[in-house]
Amino acid sequence: MVARTVIATICSNNYLSQARVFFDTVRRFHPDAALVLGLADLVDPSCAYPEGVEVVEAAALGVADFPSFAFAYDVTEFNTAIKPFLMLRLFERGHRDVVYFDPDIALYRRLDDLLALLDGGASLVLTPHFCSPPGEGAARTELHILQTGVFNLGFIAASQTPETEPLLRWWAGRLRHDCVNEQDRGLFVDQKFMDLIPGLAAHAVVARDTGFNVAYWNLGRRTVGWGADGGWTVDGRPLGFFHFSGFAPERPLEVSRYTPEPPATGALAALLADYAERRRAASAPAGAEARPYAYGRFASGIRIPDAVRHMFRDKHLTWSGDPFATYDRYCRLPHPGCRIGTGGEIVTNLMHHHHGRHAALRHSYDLQHPAGVAAYARFFAGEAESRGFDPSLWRVAA
């Protein structure tokens, strides 16, 4: 019998300690839910996956042209890009409610009030980054949220309603090619598209309970304390779930590496210390989860730089074959539109794309003149070394 509710997260193998803590808290408060880990990686027999949790590889989610999809994104982008595909797959299995949390979240009570929103007819439930305006001098301002998205997609819940599947398929379609961290283009991985949901979804609900999705971006407007029963509270009500985004157990008083907040004190410090201890207890033996990210290298073993992924996205929405096996050769082919330098220098496809993405380089080096080609080739050789580009990705192919 298929469970009514499935609770899921997504991570790569390097985030399994966070996932173990997350699922421990879910089992405590929602033992009746099915548990699924969407793996943005390949299963590694040496890794200790959370007990009692089904692991579903991203490659099994039915994404069209999966090799190109995985190749186009860095690890953060890829983890977020597969979210709607996983949710759709779980609905196809017959679950009525699909509740997603990021792996660096911990639950602190049953979330029946949140699930009740789904029972009441909500197609989607979202939580906003802010539930009140930031004050003067706040570490995170309205501008930060306008750049990254109104809603934090570390949490999203969905129920089977007539509008749910079309919305998830629309979202998946956008993330197929545009799940990128390019805030200058108005895109921040999976989040910015969901700013449109209040206009697109008649039955979407914004959950404004300040005990949901508590994190560094809203702590300036929320007060963590202790309740009469010894549990943690937020604004005097029981804490639902805390999002430990950017938290490092070895620095337990630092809320997040993403914010300049002062060291935590009082109940917040105790909450962070408790989570840090849980993370340490959930850590695998040294090196057990230090395997390279499965989609981080070419088949040859060469690391894939972000610049190569950017070129692939900009120039090749479609690619014949497996880019992990063939795109490295394309990178080092001579670009057909450039002259040969005064010393015989040649601009390869990767070099040319890097030139085109940066106005200062376009202004400084004219690739239609041999002297400009020679100067740019010298510059790029130094740039490539400092960025760790493997020479076989930018030197001319034999």
Image (cartoon, helix red, strand yellow):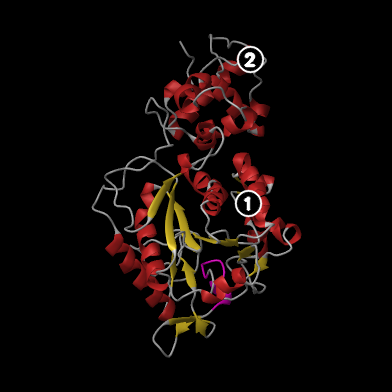
Q: Secondary structure at mark 1?
A: helix
Task: Report which residue position mark 2 lands on.
Answer: 338
Asked whether residue 67 is drawn in magenta, I would say: no
Asked whether residue 220 is drawn in magenta, I would say: yes
Q: Nearer the viewer, mark 1 or mark 2?
A: 1
Q: Look at label 2 and name its amino acid.
A: Cys
Which residue occupies 55% across, 50% down?
Answer: 92
Image: magenta residue range = 214-222
Between marks 1 and 2, how big is the CA–CA gap?
Answer: 44 Å
x and y, in percent, of residue 344 in the image:
53, 8
x and y, in percent, of residue 311 in the image:
58, 30
- The image quarter in which residue 292 lies: top left
Marked residue nearer the N-terminal end (1 or 2): 1
Task: Report which residue position mark 1 lands on.
Answer: 168
Q: Look at label 1 and name its amino acid.
A: Leu
Which residue occupies 55% across, 71% down?
Answer: 115
Which residue occupies 53% across, 16% down?
Answer: 333
